[in-house]
Image (spheres, grey):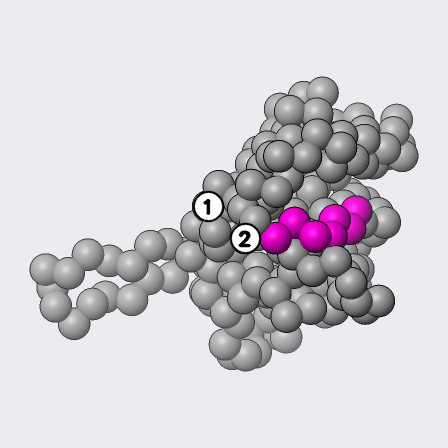
Amino acid sequence: MSTAPILVASCSPRKGGNSDFAASLIARTLPGQANVMRVADMSVRPCNACGVCDSMPGRCTLDGYTVQPTDPKAPLPPMDGAKALFAALAGGPVSFVVSPIYYYHIPAQAKAWVDRAQRWWAMNGETPARGKALACVFISGRTNGERLFEGAELTMRWMARTLGMEWMEPLHLRGLESSSALADSPELQASVSYYTAKVLAGLPR
């Protein structure tokens, strides 16, 4: 198994909530080094459908792109973080993505990152992440809803397919309404740690 750091991406725009706590639990359960990244802090710009990746697969014109402000004294906007996230995704043998459910889907910041995987669509899975695995933990405040996780799961499953990654069955957590719900539940914490260990056990040796 690769010794490269394993990406643990927290997709919630809220800092210090259930997604961040779950990400820290996963990182502590991993036997090696973890690379914990908050997607909402990476300033990922949404795909603008420029079409460059159609003719030059793997390339995105938004990588490292900045816009000079009209006011020369104004600070430059932050660098786009999609490239760094995808590099981390391709590093370890598996990556973990933790996301809350917003209107039956992942938050807007995370969806922008997923959409930027379009750069590899024409490569038929021949990407830097090919052969790696993707595991997700989805967290919902609601307790009911048969299709509560369906939108988020389909989106992440198809990102994995585009990147040539193996899709691992996700963990669904319901009823975590307050920001400290996971921190207050040893039982749910144990389920996150167990899921992490289960994913690792299923990887090729």
Can residue 41 be found in the magenta stretch?
Answer: no
Q: Are marks 1 and 2 in contact (CB under 8 Å)?
A: yes
Q: Nearer the viewer, residue 185 or 3?
A: 185
Mark 2 closeness class: few <14, some 14–19, many ≥20 residues within 10 Å: many
Residue 18, image x, y percentages: 59, 44
* Start-end of magenta stretch: 171-177
Q: Is residue 174 magenta?
A: yes
What residue is drawn where x is 85% and y is 49%?
Answer: 169
Mark sitting on residue 12: 2
Horizontal and vertical percent for residue 92? 69, 35
Instruction: Kindly indicate the quadrant of the structure image that contains residue 151.
Output: bottom right
Mark linked to residue 15: 1
Above or below, 1 relative to 51: above
Taking the spot 87% from the left edge, 29% from the top edge, the residue there is: 201
Rendered-image quadrant of the N terminus: top right
Amino acid type, mark 2: Ser
Above or below: residue 139 compared with residue 3:
below
Q: Is residue 66 left or right of residue 99?
A: left
Identify the residue shown where x is 56% and y is 41%: 180
Q: Position of residue 99 (x, y in %)?
A: 63, 52
What is the C-alpha distance between the residues marked 1 and 2?
7 Å
